[in-house]
Image (tube, helix red, strand yellow):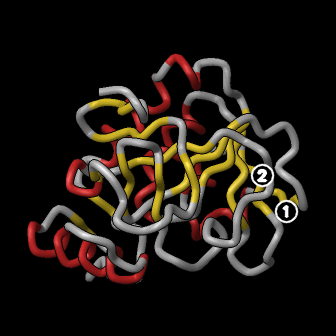
Amino acid sequence: MTGPLTAGACREAMWNRLAATRAVSYPLPPHGHHPNFARARDAARHLLAHPELAGVRVLVAGPERVLLPLRKLALEAGLTLYVPHQKKEGWYWRLTELAGAQLSRMAAVGEPRLQPEGAQAAVLACVAADRQGGRLGKGFGWGARGLKLDLPEYTLAHPLMLLDGLPCPADSVVRLISTPGGVVTPGKP
């Protein structure tokens, strides 16, 4: 991706690239979604093990399929999760049971809450990210509306999704980008 692109064109190019290289799995095609990339569990493991998240006990995590391994690992480690409610804008599911990692089980085991009480950080999915910390989401949904929570944000990305620079404005800025191979600290080589 070279030259200036609109956010929509950047997303489309990334979805095409990921689909062509078969770096993603369900939901397919990845277009319109935060890509569920190969080895997302490894990326989640690296992020949760990073010293910057060592003291985090309450985490906001997106409902996207690619973040399912992160939700599972966090709940297994005893963290409390808040996941945005899919049908009530502005509401969250408070989750402490492993079954709550699955989107289909959140209503059965989660508690609906208006605020993510005690949340210390947020993990958002992305379509692309850059080495300066820019994160580009799918363009709609809870993450695109802005969290308005004043929390540090983090994301997971496949190496193909990590760019030297986004060719469009970022949706948000993240402090760390975790890939299957390790954690990238924006601004550091």
In the figure, is residue 104 to the left or right of 19? right
Indicate the position of residue 50 as horizontal and vertical percent values: 47, 22
Q: Identify residue type, mark 2.
A: Arg
Badge 2 vs badge 1, beta-carbon distance below 8 Å: yes
Question: Callout 1, which amino acid?
Answer: Pro
Q: Which residue is mark 2?
A: 94
Residue drawn where x is 79% and y is 76% of the image: 89
Quarter of the image with the C terminus is top left
> Height in image: 41 above or below 110?
above
Tell me if mark 1 has few (under 14), some (14-19) or many (20+) residues whose alpha carbon lies within 10 angstroms of its own. Answer: some
Horizontal side of residue 36 vs 181, given as left or right: right
Mark 2 nearby-residue class (10 Å; few <14, some 14–19, many ≥20):
many
Distance between the Cα atoms at labels 2 and 1? 6 Å
Q: Which residue is mark 1?
A: 112
Query: Is 18 or 185 nearer to us in this picture?
Result: 185
Secondary structure of the residue carrying numbered label 2: strand
Which part of the image, by quadrant, shows the N terminus?
A: bottom left
Q: Is residue 112 visible?
A: yes
Give how far across and how far down residue 58 sits, in percent.
73, 36
